[in-house]
Image (cartoon, helix red, strand yellow):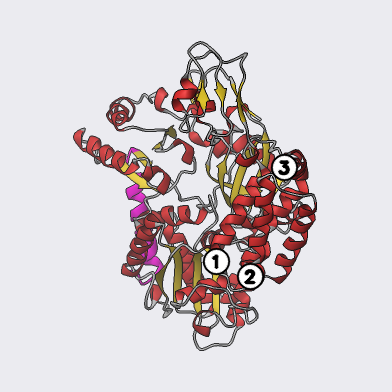
Amino acid sequence: MIRSLAELNALKDIAKAQMEGYEKQILICGGTGCTSSGSHKLYEKLQEEVRLHGLEEKVAVIKTGCFGLCALGPVMITQPDGCFYAHLEMDHIPEIIEKHIIGGQPIREYLYQETVQGDGILKYTQTPFYGSQERVVLRNCGVIAPDNINHYIARDGYQALARALLHMTADEIIKELEISGLKGRGGAGFPTYLKWTFTRNAKGDEKYVCCNADEGDPGAFMNRSVLEGDPHSVLEAMAIAGYVVGSHQGYIYVRAEYPIAVEHLNIAIAQARELGLLGKNILGTGFDFDIELRLGAGAFVCGEETALMRSIEGKRGEPRVRPPFPANQGLFEKPTLLNNVETYSVIPQILIKGGQWYAQYGPDGAKGTKVFALGGKINHTGLVEIPLGTTLRKVVEEIGGGIPGGKKFKAAQAGGPSGGCIPASLIDTPIEYASLKAVGSIVGSGGLIIMDEDTCMVDIAKFFLEFTIDESCGKCTACRIGMKRLLELLDKITSGKGEMEDLDRLEELAAHIQASSLCALGQTAPNPVLSTLRYFRDEYIAHITEKKCPAGVCKALLHYRINPDKCKGCTMCARVCPADAITGTVRNPHTIDTTKCIKCGACMEKCKFGAIEKK
């Protein structure tokens, strides 16, 4: 039990000495992505090999959080040499231990290939993917064991809480947040210091601090990765928030589909309680604060603050009218502070290093860094953290490694289903609040989906609209009915039955939904439709006037044919066709019966001669 700053610093010195006492560290990713690829078994094999060679006192095997380069999993880093192993397999482990860890010779064919430069090997931090990032939120992810509080303490963990409780007033903490320019990273981008101020000034005999870890955007996993890799940063920040606003109870609302995050949070809370960093009389200051988890069932609408609080209360998760805002009347009708995982995670560093340090990143009005889940048609899918103001081009071409297969970049969807598509012509747009708003998109919580030339933008609008329709709580008519009418118009267009007047109807209906919906889910749901209409109107027109999908995606407008000049009569297409729609004899051109063809594309995928064409 730690009851003073001196005791915390003593534990820090011990923990740091333990971590630095090993000659080598083997860091293996234990995040969801790598775990699904078997990294937990590799971790056990590494421990076994280290014991087999009697290296327990010299080599530490640490299961960490996400490294970020999820496309290469399972991944592993050796320190201090910074070698990055990718696509690891079980039979690689004994060889790596013997030749690299013991013999000092990294095995080049198992390394992340961008680190292999001629006769030399770069540290992973020198690659474009990592070298172009600023890891502030992710500073501990991939570096520490998230289930060991000593690892967090060794890297200045809970120092910010001690400084806040022992040396700072609530007003001084809020001032540092104001200087930092930190805005909420959950999507709205509201200044953090103002939200804390409002809750602090609210009248109430009891107040609450909540953390939004619901994260329902398709393809988004920023919050999940922070909770998996660095859970104590969120606990520490929530305790600081409790001190500032006058709360003694916190709740983390996390979706149940994040089992590793939930496990690590439970472990972290138990460890912090055991050391007296949560609970009664924290650090001997008389301040009490504790945290409980509440598991969500995966409803996207529960990412909205009032719906989230209703869900914590055990009620149906649906938004309510604001005002009153949660700062005055939130959880259990009491004043409540709500921030998301990423917002909380940087606050301990801001208090240790100062608001001015954080404000060095990003332009005016968009200070700091932002974590993005980079997905879609991009070589380096994964988690990236960049200073706000970094251009989309740098993210796509440098950090993301470009588009696979030599395809052309077509668009990026920022902000998930609430965001908008940014076309290739605007690839030099800075990624920050004002710039993205100007082009019809948003920063959002951090989803960034990359699309190539084979993407149908009308189909993309349909995809996101289908998602928001499924996730709507149905409380307000504009959202419940309006979005279904929008989807009907899109279905009509993609099935070849659209009319030019439908484009005007889409825009008019979208405007009504934006203006009339109760919460941000409905207000932003038309964004993908409006942004694709704005930048890719020609594709909509082609669907309507030419009855053609330029990207060859919409099945109703698609026709497969076999080019007789290229067909060699190998019969492969006929053999894989599930509808028996292809006929022909050996060594003679085949034909497709369009009345039978189900447009699955199996024939085109298997044809080795490029004879099958989509029209």
Tell which of 157 and 146 is nearer to you. 146
Disc 3 marks which amino acid? His
Q: Earlier in the sequence, mark 1 or mark 3?
A: 1
Instruction: Say which element carries label 3.
Output: helix
Q: Nearer the viewer, mark 1 or mark 3?
A: 3
Mark 2 — residue? Answer: 519
Tell me if residue 388 can be seen.
no
Residue at the (38%, 64%) spot, across then down: 8
**Residue 36 at x, y percent in the picture:** 37, 44
Residues marked 1 and 2 touching at CB (< 8 Å): yes
Mark 3 neighbour class, 10 Å CA radius: few under 14, some 14 to 19, many 20 or more: many
Horizontal side of residue 487 vs 373, given as left or right: right
Mark 3 — residue? Answer: 543
In the rendered structure, does residue 495 fall within the stretch colored magenta? Answer: no
Count the numbered circles shown. 3
Tell which of 24 and 196 is nearer to you. 196
Mark 1 — residue? Answer: 301
Disc 1 marks which amino acid? Val
Horizontal side of residue 462 vs 540, given as left or right: left
Q: Which mark is residue 613?
A: none
Q: CA distance from mark 1 to mark 3?
A: 32 Å
Residues marked 1 and 3 touching at CB (< 8 Å): no
Q: Which residues are magenta?
A: 1-24
Residue at the (54%, 26%) spot, across then down: 604
In this rendering, is residue 297 above or below 391?
below
State whether the magenta stretch is mostly helix, strand or loop. helix
Q: Quadrant of the N terminus?
A: bottom left
Mark 2 neighbour class, 10 Å CA radius: few under 14, some 14 to 19, many 20 or more: many
Residue at the (56%, 56%) spot, across then down: 467
In this rendering, is residue 377 above or below 192?
above
Horizontal side of residue 267 vs 335, given as left or right: left
Q: CA distance from mark 2 to mark 3?
A: 32 Å
